[in-house]
Every structure is written in structure tokens, then in C-alpha cells.
Amino acid sequence: MRKPDLAAAIAEKADLTKEQANRVLNAVLEEITGALHRKDSVTLVGFGTFHVGTRVARTGRNPRTGAVIELQSAKIPKFRP
């Protein structure tokens, strides 16, 4: 399911127009994104938790050339059901 499909489903179930449902969906996603930028977690009871995780530094390969490259550690969004 893509974002427009999800907005259409929300519109149907909540008796909203597709435009209103799209605005609601965008607002929810912006709030989740904002919380993750602040390094907060977002828990939706009965669904799961969005949180910021750390990906450790590692060695990788360029798939085109096969050259070995060093990948730095990074903060990434994660979801735990």
C-alpha cells in the first residue's frame, strides 16, 4: 500500500474527503519525523514503536566496481512492532 492508498482508506473509514485525509496523514508523519529528529521515540499502543537507532561503522562494497569502502556509523529510524 502506498501513501495515496492509505490516505484514501483513511478518508473512507473516517468519513473525510481525500484531501482532508491526506492532510491528517501528512501531519501524523511530520510529527513522527519531528520526534525522531529530537531523538524521542513514538509509541502507538497496539501497533509499535518508532525510535532512533545506530548503525555501526562497517566495511562495504561498491556493487558496480567491487571496490571496498568504509561506511561510517549513522543514526537511522527504526520500527519495532
Image (spheres, rainbow, N blue to C red):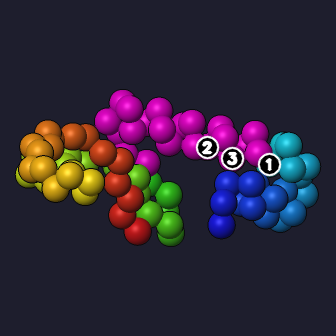
Q: Which residue does the image show at 9% across and 50% down from the upper left?
A: 68
Q: Amino acid at mark 1?
A: Ala
Residue 18 falls left or right of residue 58: right
Whether the residues at callouts 1 and 3 have beta carbons within 8 Å, the answer is: yes
Distance from disc 2 to disc 3, alpha carbons, whole Å, reads 5 Å
Q: Nearer the viewer, residue 80 or 7?
A: 7
Q: Nearer the viewer, residue 62 or 4?
A: 62
Residue 70 falls left or right of residue 81: left
Residue 75 shows in this picture: yes
Q: Nearer the viewer, residue 26 or 63?
A: 63
Q: Amino acid at mark 3?
A: Leu
Residue occupied by mark 1 = 21
Residue farthest toward the front in the current orientation of the protein: 65
Residue occupied by mark 3 = 25
Distance from disc 2 to disc 1, alpha carbons, whole Å, reads 11 Å
Residue 69 falls left or right of residue 75: left
Residue occupied by mark 2 = 28
Q: Amino acid at mark 2?
A: Val
Q: Is residue 74 above or below residue 11?
A: above
Q: Label 3: few (<14), some or many (≥20) within 10 Å?
A: some
Q: Is residue 45 above or below residue 26?
A: below
Whether the residues at callouts 2 and 3 have beta carbons within 8 Å, the answer is: yes
What is the span of residues highlighted in magenta in the rendered image? 22-42
Q: Picture coordinates of residue 38 (x, y %)?
A: 36, 30
